Image (tube, rainbow, N blue to C red):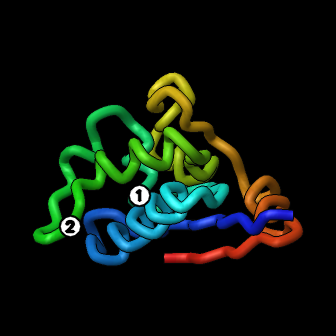
């Protein structure tokens, strides 16, 4: 069985380098042919909405919107259920291809055979 990655990003503009690292690793893994599931939690939940990733700026970093496009093209992107609810984000608000799911789905993914889980 091929190895896969589940990456949870817990930061947004409040910790821009940590946020960008998660998206960069996720996009690099997708580009390398690794199955990737990127979870947006906390303030990163906002990046599941259209246009929000374009607002993120970090010097000397690939634009977050470009990294998100790579992950969406070859992996899955999930916004945490509770994080979405706390921000009044509904499924109809999300970028096409982004889903909302909760802890049980996250646990199921990270406990899969051959899965490498990372939290940023």
Q: Is residue 120 left or right of residue 17?
A: right
Can you give x and y, in whole percent of width and height, for residue 68 in the image? 40, 48
Q: Are marks 1 and 2 in contact (CB under 8 Å)?
A: no
> What x and y, as percent, mark residue 25?
46, 69
- Local SS, label 1: helix
- Left or right, 73 with respect to 61, comes to right
1 vs 2, front mark: 2
What number is the disc on residue 44? 1
Q: In the depicted view, which residue is nearer to us: 62 or 15?
A: 62
User: Horizontal and vertical percent for residue 115?
Assistant: 77, 70
Q: State the residue lying farthest toward the top.
A: 92
Could one spot residue 111 in this view of the protein? yes
Q: Nearer the viewer, residue 43 or 25?
A: 25
Residue at image mark 2: 61
Horizontal placement of 68 versus 65: left or right? Answer: right
The N terminus - image quarter = bottom right
Earlier-in-chain disc, 1 versus 2? 1
- Identify the residue at horizontal 41%, vertical 57% (top origin): 44
């Amino acid at each position: 069985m091929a190895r896969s990655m589940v990456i949870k990003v817990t930061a947004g503009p409040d910790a821009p380098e940590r946020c960008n690292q998660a998206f960069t690793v996720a996009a690099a893994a997708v580009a390398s042919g690794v199955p990737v599931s990127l979870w947006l939690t906390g303030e990163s939940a906002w990046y599941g909405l259209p246009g929000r990733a374009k607002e993120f700026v970090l010097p000397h970093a690939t634009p977050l919107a470009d990294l998100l496009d790579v992950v969406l093209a070859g992996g899955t992107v999930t916004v945490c259920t509770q994080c979405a609810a706390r921000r009044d984000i509904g499924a109809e608000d999300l970028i096409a291809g982004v889903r909302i799911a909760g802890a049980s789905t996250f646990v199921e993914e990270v406990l899969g055979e051959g899965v490498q889980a990372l939290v940023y």
